[in-house]
Amino acid sequence: MANSAAGRLYVVATPIGNLGDFSPRAGDTLRSCSLIAAEDTRHTGTLLRHFGIATPTISLHDHNERQRSPDLVARMQAGESIALVSDAGTPAISDPGYELVGAAAAAGIEIVAIPGPCAALAAVSIAALPTDRFCFEGFLPARAAARRARLESLSAEARTLVFYESPHRIVEALEDCRDSLGPERRAAVARELTKLHESLYRGSLAELCVRSRLDADFARGEIVIVIAGRPPAPPQQGSAELDRVLGLLLAELPLKQAARLAAQIFGVRDNEAYKSALRLKQESGSP
């Protein structure tokens, strides 16, 4: 429950490139707060000067957020309102802010989102890949072995996958995506979104890997990778017939014996027949 006597924490999204995306509400919020906690005060200072905002700033980044958060929470408990911003986009989305938001929530501080630009959502909206379900994975690991392990763990994910990637790793990252997820997977690479040299590349992972090595501009700027999820497996031929025979066998035999016999009849693996037998038994309500 929020403490009505305390100040607020405003989580304010800022442009990822085009200053025209800075909302009037964001500007009004930054002007009204006592303090702005910024990932890089120099970077944010340029934005504030452009819009004539004179609110003081304090740095809040990966290396000092845990130590600085208690003092900021105390200031809000004393009645000050503080705005949280990152260098670009929405704070705490693969950017600093999680620790402060968590500490403020634990202290009962009211937290208000001032929504706006987010590179991940912008890329998903124009990638021409399924958007009904997607998962954001942030940055892939920098080390090749860890990156491949992460991708292997996602190889069966049916939702659209969204990653951030740095330009100097994009070629290797795409090749690891191709090898782990399959060369035919549809994907899109968005770079420099909302900026002067915005580009969007679509194609299979195999095609994008080739493009990444031929196009010098491919490895420049801020990059988002969007990859289609794993397509559903086609229904196995004979599955209905397997279920029919299993139903007959289960009426006469114990589950394991029925599954083993069905596996021999249909030439499928024992565990596959066992899973089907177990499902049929559960559906029938048999003990």
Image (spheres, grey):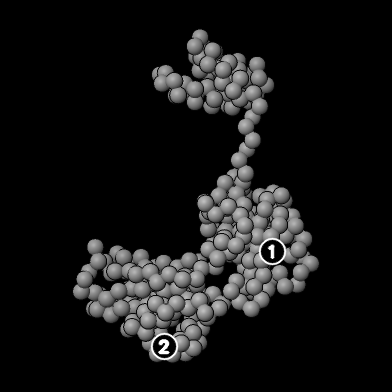
In the image, residue 183 above or below residue 5: above
Q: Which residue is at 40% across, 85% downward?
A: 57
What is the quadrant of residue 194 in the picture? bottom right
Q: Is residue 107 left or right of residue 196?
A: left
Image coords of residue 233 (percent x, y): 63, 38
Instruction: Tell me which amino acid carries mark 1.
Output: Tyr
Question: Mark 1, residues whose alpha carbon is within 10 Å: few (<14), some, or many (≥20)?
Answer: some
In x, y percent, where is residue 261?
60, 15
Mark drawn on residue 252: none
Q: Is residue 37 visible?
A: no
The residue tagged 2 is: 53
The residue tagged with tag 1: helix, strand or loop?
strand
Q: Is residue 198 above or below residue 280?
A: below
Vertically, is 195 above or below 149?
A: below
Amino acid type, mark 2: Ile
Image quadrant holding the N terminus, namely: bottom left
Q: Earlier in the sequence, mark 2 or mark 1?
A: 2
Left or right: 37, with 216 as reference point: left
User: Disc 2, disc 1: CB below 8 Å?
Assistant: no
In depth, the one of 172 and 185 nearer the eye is 185
The local crowd at label 2, few if under 14, some if 14 to 19, many if 20 or more residues have their Cα within 10 Å, is some
Quarter of the image where one finds residue 13: bottom left
Residue 108 point in image, percent of width and height: 26, 66
Depth check: 190 or 125 in front? 125
Q: Residue at x 54, y 13 (%)?
A: 249
- Gap between marks 2 and 1, in whole Å? 37 Å
- State the count of labels: 2
- On residue 201, the disc is 1
- Furthest residue in direction left, as rendered: 5
Query: At 56% from the left edge and 77% from the top edge, which residue is drawn?
Result: 17
Asked if one can make out residue 132 in the rendered structure from this viewpoint, the answer is yes
